[in-house]
Image (tube, rainbow, N blue to C red):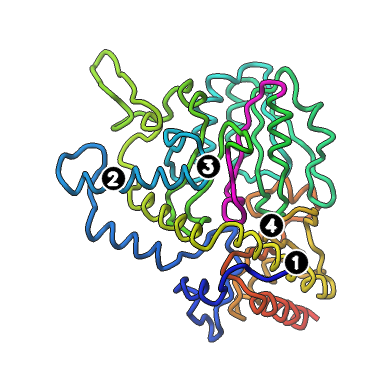
Amino acid sequence: MSGPGFDLARVRADFPILRQEVRGRPLVYLDSAATGQKPQAVLDALTRYYTHDNANVHRGVHILSERATQAFEDARETVRRFIHAKDVREVIFVRGTTEAINLVAATYGRKHVGPGDEVLISAMEHHSNIVPWQMVCDAAGAKLRVIPVDERGELQMDAVDALLTERTRLLAITHVSNALGSVNPIKELVAKAHAKNIPVLVDGAQSVTHFPVDVQDLGCDFYAFSGHKLFGPTGIGVLYGKLSMLESLPPYQGGGDMILSVTMEKTVYNRVPHRFEAGTPDMAGAVGLAAAIRYLEAVGMENVSQHDQWLLAYATDALRSVPGLKLVGTAPRKTGVLSFTLEDVHPHDVGTILDQEGICIRTGHHCAQPLMQRFGVAATARASLALYNTREDVDALVKGLHKVKEVFA
């Protein structure tokens, strides 16, 4: 496979945090599935906003409020374009993927899930796409059902049709597993669910960073992702929802800006999307997220995807050369996540020794404990790749893993 379709050295230079040394060694950052690093363009956008435009939005008549409101709503349009939503009103700003899913659980779930009903998820979900649905089901007297995962980390698609029943009120499914890197066939799943008039929520936290996403092409009813994984600021995220669906839902929280009028007797709620954005939003976060999206668009998401597959193939082969290493998650269609165990060495020990070599990976259950149980492990070590990673980063990881083996020999 050919290399990245962009100047990798130039892209790396755009991320100032990568220039540092840690523990006397050049930083090797392989934990982007947890959070992505920030290009200078995002840092500059945040500084520029706070230096020149900071004010509350939608409320003031002064020039700073006008500029802040314009920047905030321009960011909404940037997100719409990035995910190919049909209408800018389908973009709701939230704190992140977790809040986006909880918003749907608290509105759609509260309205549509009742006694004896079912919500369908998969065995590879992050806790943020498990716990909210457990809460909904517990409150409603409904049942949570689970699509199983095979030994390679693929959904068992032959089980889906039987699990989508006349009692299923929602399918909530991840686009990309944060613990395995498996890419799920969302378009096919949406078609199966919609054939039975079942709406679909997609957790896109791990997908939007690796390849282009077109929510209209996927056909999903909701799509959620976080800014910080997309090389933007923390504390900002997006819930996409089809306009007809959003307009049918009750508010998520009460407060300022989600209302048109309030008396002591009655409140008239605001229009979509503001109905779901109570209180002062993260204006700077939205501006920073838009800057991150513009940066990625300049690089080209197709180029990002090409780099991802090129480096993933190289890293997969390199890790398989390490004696005693077992990859966990070997689905044919994956993105840049490599989870593994190393003989009798606990993943936390692997991570600790790699840290001494200046290498940052993630260890633990990755907020996917049911999935760990499925594979019979308590935890894995996880190296996750992004557009700024290189073959040299992978080589450093392999060298570090040999050091781990020496320590525990």
* x 44%, y 57%: residue: 294
In the visual, does 65 lie left or right of 313?
left
Give the dominant element type of the magenta stretch: helix, strand or loop.
loop
In primary-sequence order, the first of circles 2 and 3 is 2
Whole-number angstrom distance, CA of label 4 to CA of label 2? 35 Å
**Residue picked out by circle 2:** 70
User: How busy is the neighbourhood of tag 4: few (under 14 within 10 Å), some, or many (20 plus)?
Assistant: many
Front in this rendered view, residue 141 or 218: 218
- Tag 1 secondary structure: helix
Closest to the camera, between mark 3 and mark 4, is: 3
Q: Quadrant of residue 108?
A: top right
Q: Is residue 132 left or right of residue 369?
A: left
* Residue count near mark 1 (Cα–Cα under 10 Å), binned few <14, some 14–19, many ≥20: some
Return the mark for residue 364.
none
Give the CA distance from mark 2 to mark 3: 21 Å
Q: Which quadrant of the figure contains the C terminus?
A: bottom right
Magenta stretch, residue numbers: 195-215
Which image quarter is the N terminus in?
bottom right
Q: Position of residue 207 (x, y in %)?
A: 61, 50
In this rendering, the answer to whether 355 lies above or below 111 is below
Q: Amino acid at mark 2?
A: Gln
Q: Which residue matches tag 4?
A: 335
Q: Marks 4 and 1, how far apart in space?
A: 10 Å
Label 4 vs 1, first from the N-terminus: 1
* Marked residue nearer the N-terminal end (1 or 2): 2
Q: Residues within 10 Å of mark 2 (few under 14, many from 20)?
A: some
**Which residue is tagged 3?**
84
Label 3 to label 1: alpha-carbon separation: 29 Å
Residue identifier under label 1? 313
Which one is in front in this view, the residue at disc 4 or the one at disc 2? 2
